[in-house]
Amino acid sequence: MTALAPVYGIVVRDVIRAFRQKGRLVGGLARSFMWLLLVGTGYNAIARVEGVSSYQEFVYPGLVVMAMLFGAMLTAISTVYDREFGMLRLMLASPAGASAILAGRAIAATIIGILQGGVLLVCLPMFFSVTASQLVNAVAALALGAAASSALGLLVAAPLRSVENFASVINVVLFPLFFLSGALYPTGRMPAGLRHVAQVNPVSHAVDLMRAALGQPAEFGATHSVLVLIAMTVSCFFLTMLIFDPEHRFTLRDRPAGR
Amino acid sequence: MSSKESAGPPAIDAVGLGRDFGETRALDALDLLVPAGAMVGLLGPNGAGKTTAMLVLATLLRPSRGGARVFGYDITRARTAVRNHLGLVFQEASVDGLLTVEENLLFAARLVGVGNQSARQAAADAMERVGLTERRSQPARHLSTGWRRLIDLARATLHRPALLVLDEPTVGLDPEHRDRAWRLLETERRERGTTVLFSTHYLAEAEGCDRVVLLARGRVVASDTPAALKATLGDEVVEVEGPDAHRLLPVMRDLVDVRLAIRTERGCRVGIVGSRDGLTKLASLAPKLVRLTVRPATLDDVYFAMTQASHAEPSASDRVGEPV
């Protein structure tokens, strides 16, 4: 018997599931590449960003974060699927406890986020010149961003009752987080109100850290962004533990059938 | 009770266990004593509180009142210890369709803390026990309901728990898969002395239990061995079918010793004690009688008698389920 076995089991299961859902995996990557090749090509002609040679070069770190963000958060939010289809109660009935379940899911989501963002990093030398040390820094930035995104995803999933809310979560949480992150356009050019929102948006710090890692001008500074992402990860995880209700499945949406 | 009862703490000792959902009293007050090694069937109509009772005993729901111990461990204060003793099968299958059979079992093994190498062995043994070895590499979503249910049972027994709590484990299974399921449970019980608490709507499955507990409206309305429960109805059961069959009850009382009578869809069911000879006169007294059958009592009879009686109002003299 080992205490880490449940966490390991949840990580292995989620990673296997991610690779078996090829449509979701490919779709997550296609989103970033479509933006780079279709939108980026068009914007190259009309957008000029200081410190980089083209809009595509500017947007690339943001697209790495986009792939990571969707991979990590959607995996974390899939807790609501498990709740709906009976796998969560199986986990909750185990001696592992809710904290091990949440930790396992957070680690799995982080790994999937890193893998999805990592594909874009691997492809980076095909489009732009990059040094080995920049790539190493970028992987570290990716890992931090993925951890924060996973913890945020868990927090979003904790109060969700059913999969019907899943699509609205993507529209109401994921897209605003991404569009207000400075991934697609510099936050400095945003209206003052939106700029303030962008400054407290954890995804802005993941993007900014990625820019810094890849040698682009950064707005917040690497140290500041690292601290924000760590704080975000820790606070979201512990907040999730506080609001996560193991009885949720049985008491809210539908009481046990055949009571 | 089973000869395998041990001298240690009982597998389950619940006193006044209850659970509310808002204003709904799903489980009113469950008193249940299950000795280690026993097989106990929990019967009752939908909404009687069976699932809620099992979820509370499995520490997945906190009780609203009362308390329970599983092998001496309090279900609210020592949840981890209780869970370490438990193998649980829910009413709906808990199988990940994207994983293979073996991956599902490895996942379950790791959840209960079994290390990697031991997990593989435990999963292989569990597949062997239910006949899933040949299907080990198949994605669970490609399997029939019966095989998916057997994955559930293999999962529940994988870590060889001392107590199995099974919520309608054979619902929707064909006779072959049902037989496989019961063979597994019998083997676990015989070879390892595993305690089994299960709910079912297939009352014949409860015939082999050490004890049958009948729930209605969140309360225990009867609890005894199947034989003793059947004996409460009398020596035999008379099934009377036809219009106004229940009006024959006063006549029957004069002819035979009636222990209990309940109204059914097609007439009435009467438990009798002693000689049945007087019943032959019934046919001549009631020309509209469609059928009159005398047979040994079954758990179905007990179920109808006890659960319907719990719904009957004391003032209604000839109401359905009212004891005569």
Image (cartoon, coloured by chain):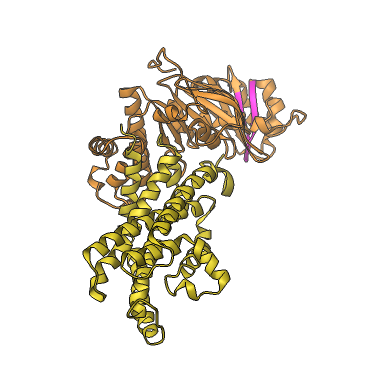
Residue at x-position 39% and y-position 29%: B84
Query: Can the viewer see residue B208 in this picture?
Result: yes
Residue at x-position 46% and y-position 20%: B72
Residue B68: % across, % down? 53, 24
Which secondary structure is most common in the magenta stretch?
A: strand
* A97 or B60, nearer to the observer: A97
Q: Is residue A121 left or right of residue B20?
A: left
Q: Is residue B305 left or right of residue B34?
A: right
* B27 or A165, nearer to the observer: A165
* Colour orange belongs to chain: B
What are the residue bounds of the magenta stretch?
A: B258-271
Tell me if residue A160 comes above or below residue B269 in the rendering: below
* B146 or A11, nearer to the observer: A11
* Colour yellow belongs to chain: A
* B59 or A174, nearer to the observer: A174
Say whether residue B113 is magenta.
no
Residue B135: % across, % down? 25, 47
